Amino acid sequence: MKIPIKVLINNKEVKTMVEPRQLLVFLLRDQLRLTGTHIGCDTSSCGACTVHLDGNAVKSCTVLAVQVDGRSVHTIESMAGSALHPIQEGFKEEHGLQCGFCTPGMIMTTANLLRTCPNPSEHQIREALEGNICRCTGYHNIIKAVQYAADKLQKEVKHV
């Protein structure tokens, strides 16, 4: 038995049918073809599936699709624009990615951090990212990437 839901995904209204036990990550990837949200572990340990639900970072492998009915979801695809978002630019410029598998979750977690804490300390960055696993980088350059993005976003705010 499928259940109808209506959800705002990346600022677009989506009406669809979902199974009661279907996870949000599978709705995004399999039904809506938003494949930037990765499935890394299915146990909420890795953070590769991080999205924003009503403005807060959540692991989409821990949320049922029926729970997003009437709510707003933003995926890594919402970061797309004519130029790289400062967070994406930071990951590029500071070599904060290698294989790239964890990067969408890292970026979404970073966006949440910088929304709530625009000028985080290294400790705050490490604490925010502790739910995201990267098996390639050792995190040093990821921390630098977040600091780069925070600095750039602060400069953009000052110019407005």
Image (cartoon, rainbow, N blue to C red):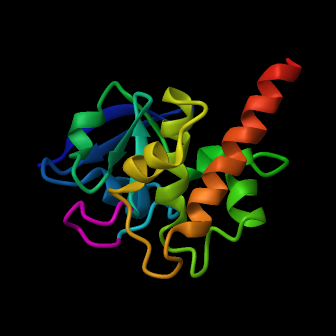
Q: Position of residue 45 (x, y in %)?
A: 25, 64
**In front here: 31 or 108?**
108
Q: Is residue 48 left or right of residue 34?
A: left
**In front here: 110 or 1?**
110
Q: Which residues are magenta?
A: 40-47
120 is higher (above) or lower (below) than 139? above
Q: Any magenta on residue 42?
A: yes
Magenta region, mostly helix, strand or loop? loop
Q: Is residue 24 left or right of residue 117?
A: left
Q: Is residue 80 visible?
A: no
**In front here: 143 or 113?**
143
Q: Position of residue 54 (x, y in %)?
A: 40, 28
101 is higher (above) or lower (below) than 30? below
Q: Position of residue 3 (x, y in %)?
A: 19, 40
Looking at the image, which residue sits at the far top? Answer: 160
Q: Is residue 32 left or right of residue 142?
A: left
Measuring 74% from the left and 30% from the top, which residue is drawn there? 154
63 is higher (above) or lower (below) than 42? above
Q: Using the rendered view, name the quadrant where residue 144 is placed.
A: bottom right
Measuring 81% from the left and 29% from the top, which residue is drawn there? 156
Measuring 48% from the left and 68% from the top, which residue is drawn there? 102
Measuring 38% from the left and 68% from the top, which residue is drawn there? 133
